[in-house]
Amino acid sequence: MPRPGPRDRQKIALSHYVAIAPRIEHEVPPGERMALWRQLAIEHGVTVRTLQRWHQTFLKEGLDGLAPAEHRSDRGQLRALPETLLDAAVQLRREQPERGSSALILLLEARFPEYRGRIARPTLDRHLRRLGATRRQLGPGHRVLRRFRTPHKNALWIADFCLPPLLWLDGVEQKPVVILGIIDHHTRRLMHFAAHPNRQATAVEDGLKGAIATFGLPAALYTDNGAELVGSLVDGACAKLGIRHICSGVGLPEGRGAIERYYANFPVMRRHGWLILSCSNLLLS
């Protein structure tokens, strides 16, 4: 569609004025104004809100305000940021399509520190959409993930079991160690961390009791859908204490990213292979 020239813009402004002229050129009692707006809207094929907006614009800016805005010759191009930055944004998005725009901006600011605080999310999203690099455009199979952080301590605790590369000796038999961790989402502090011989709901209940006695009552507890974490014992304890129990969706470990990241960086797992501990050295709840 061609851009309107100066003469066309003037014609459009005059047509807008003709539509609102009866309201401007005549004194209309307050009780009759809405009826007049509705009548004019039907005559000119626009909405009442559009006519009222034109009226307010004319009162503030005159006839020139009713003309459509001039289009820039470089419309659609990235004016405030270099093309190299946009290319980097597209590359980062294609490498990991589920990465959100906020995380993308942080990575771009780290790579282009001179543009820190100058990358507007709406602008970046618009250009990524134009280049076919939105999360939805890159494939329907990608889940949309958003970064979030709870506002204060004890707003949300995350509990999860982990099977680390550790063994304990039960007599002469080697058995795997199961670790239960509870982490505060805001501070990333461990509220509870203990090893157990197996996954049991009683271990979760005991871990919660100890953590609450030390750090106070959480507003919510976030777990996966394991039977030990969603059973009546844990649900009942949360309901009795007024804790909101939230379960993550099936196949969505990203929701427990805070504690999953801690397990991934567990020092013993990184520095050693499989370790064999005696039963006396194993902390059992």
Image (tube, rainbow, N blue to C red):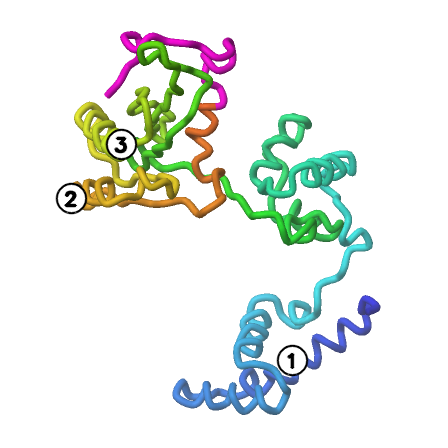
Judge depth for marks 3 and 1 and give the one in front: 3
Instruction: Indicate the position of residue 76 as horizontal and vertical percent values.
Output: 76, 53
Residue 218: which numbered mark, if any? none
Choose between 111 and 118: the one closer to the eye: 111
Is residue 271 in the magenta section? yes
Task: Give the CA separation, mark 1 to mark 2.
Answer: 67 Å
User: Does residue 193 appear left or right of residue 36 in this picture?
Assistant: left
Where, by quadrant of the figure, is residue 4 drawn? bottom right
Looking at the image, tell me whether mark 1 or mark 2 is earlier in sequence order.
Answer: 1
Looking at the image, tell me whether mark 3 or mark 1 is earlier in sequence order.
Answer: 1
Q: Residue at x 63, y 38 (%)?
A: 119
Give the residue number, with chain letter if any, for mark 1. 17
Residue 240: which numbered mark, if any? 2
Q: How many marks?
A: 3
Looking at the rendered structure, the secondary structure element under dot 1 is helix
Judge depth for marks 1 and 2 and give the one in front: 2
Instruction: Indicate the position of residue 67 as horizontal and vertical percent values.
Output: 70, 70
Specify the amino acid type for callout 3: Val
Magenta span of residues = 264-285
Residue 204: which numbered mark, if any? 3
Is residue 211 in the magenta section? no
Instruction: Indicate the position of residue 131 as horizontal and vertical percent values.
Output: 75, 49
Q: Is 26 placed above or below 108 here?
A: below
Task: Give the CA separation, mark 3 to mark 1.
Answer: 71 Å
Specify the amino acid type for callout 1: Tyr
